[in-house]
Image (cartoon, rainbow, N blue to C red):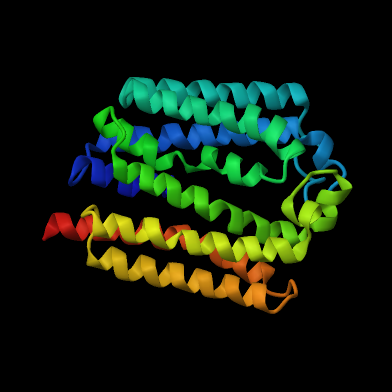
Amino acid sequence: MVTIIPALLLAANGLPPLLTSLAALLGTYLASASASVFNHLLDADLDQVMNRTRDRPVPSGQVSPQGAFAFGSALGAASLLVLYNWTTPLATTVAFLANAFYVLGYTLCLKRYTDQNIVIGGAAGAVGPLIGWAAITGTIGWPAWVLFGVIVLWTPPHFWALAIKYKNDYATANIPMLPVTRGDEATRRQIFAYTLTLIPPIIALFYFGAAGTFYLVTSLAATLYFCWKAWQLYQKHDNSGAMPVFHYSCLYLFAIFGSLTIDRLLGGLL
């Protein structure tokens, strides 16, 4: 939801319509919730054998599979209803396809069969800017695609840092996360490499005129710090820096999309 807000502002070239914006946020919230419920339902067999996830509602027996299916379906239907009635057909379609890809593509296939699961599957979690832009204009502009790319490139270092910590859990569940299939050293190297790939799209929004100086200074500083923390993790040749990278990555998107939101608001006022 955080990633939608600057896309709404950019697409509207100012303050977007309030009702459309609220509908886009609510519809995306419901779609994300639906995807999460179906993920819990379909991953219950894996979650049962992982210490980190065995207490989730479905594997622990707090929620029945039938109840989870009904709840996830209701959330998904509500999201489509909200988006279709108060935004645009394109925004509705993007949300539906992202939900379907996360549930059917990532959860059922990618997660279980390839160590590139996060790289490819990250696209499902990156559609916020696309939904926001489509909700306002009925199209998808290039800045929304750049923001989509930022989230896609951010996802691997974000999740692989966590996967290093829970490597044994994933191995026990036979999930081919990168630390399991290729080892910690290769994973630390990939984390650092992916943080470097964030620099071009971050600069592109400023260079091509979609964002201003406040965004550039703030987001570039946040990105370089992300790279530095990933470099520390890699060059130490141990995993002590994995969770600090993960914790910072959780704040990173707020810094990028928050600074872009403030930048656009300042631009509208000035």
Residue 199's place in the image compared with 224, above or below, is above
Q: Residue at x 69, y 79 (%)?
A: 236
In this view of the protein, which residue sits in the foreground, 68 or 250? 250
Res. 51 in view? no
In this view of the protein, which residue sits in the foreground, 6 or 167? 167
Residue projecting furthest to the left: 270
Q: How many marks?
A: 0
Q: In the rendered view, does 3 fall on the left or right side of 143?
A: right
Q: In the rendered view, does 180 fall on the left or right side of 107?
A: right
Residue 148 image offset from top left, x and y in percent: 42, 44
Res. 195 in view? yes
Q: In the rendered view, does 255 fall on the left or right side of 12?
A: right
Q: Quadrant of residue 182?
A: bottom right
Residue 99's place in the image compared with 183, above or below, is above
Residue 167 image offset from top left, x and y in percent: 80, 57
Q: Quadrant of residue 48?
A: top right
> Quick one: quadrant of the N terminus?
top left
In this view of the protein, which residue sits in the foreground, 249 or 24? 249
Q: Residue at x 46, y 57 (%)?
A: 253
Q: Residue at x 74, y 66 (%)?
A: 185
Residue 201's place in the image compared with 96, above or below, is below
Q: In the rendered view, does 117 fall on the left or right side of 12?
A: right
Q: Residue at x 57, y 74 (%)?
A: 229
In this view of the protein, which residue sits in the foreground, 270 or 29? 270
Residue 160 image offset from top left, x and y in percent: 67, 57
> Quick one: quadrant of the C terminus?
bottom left
Q: Quadrant of residue 12?
A: top left
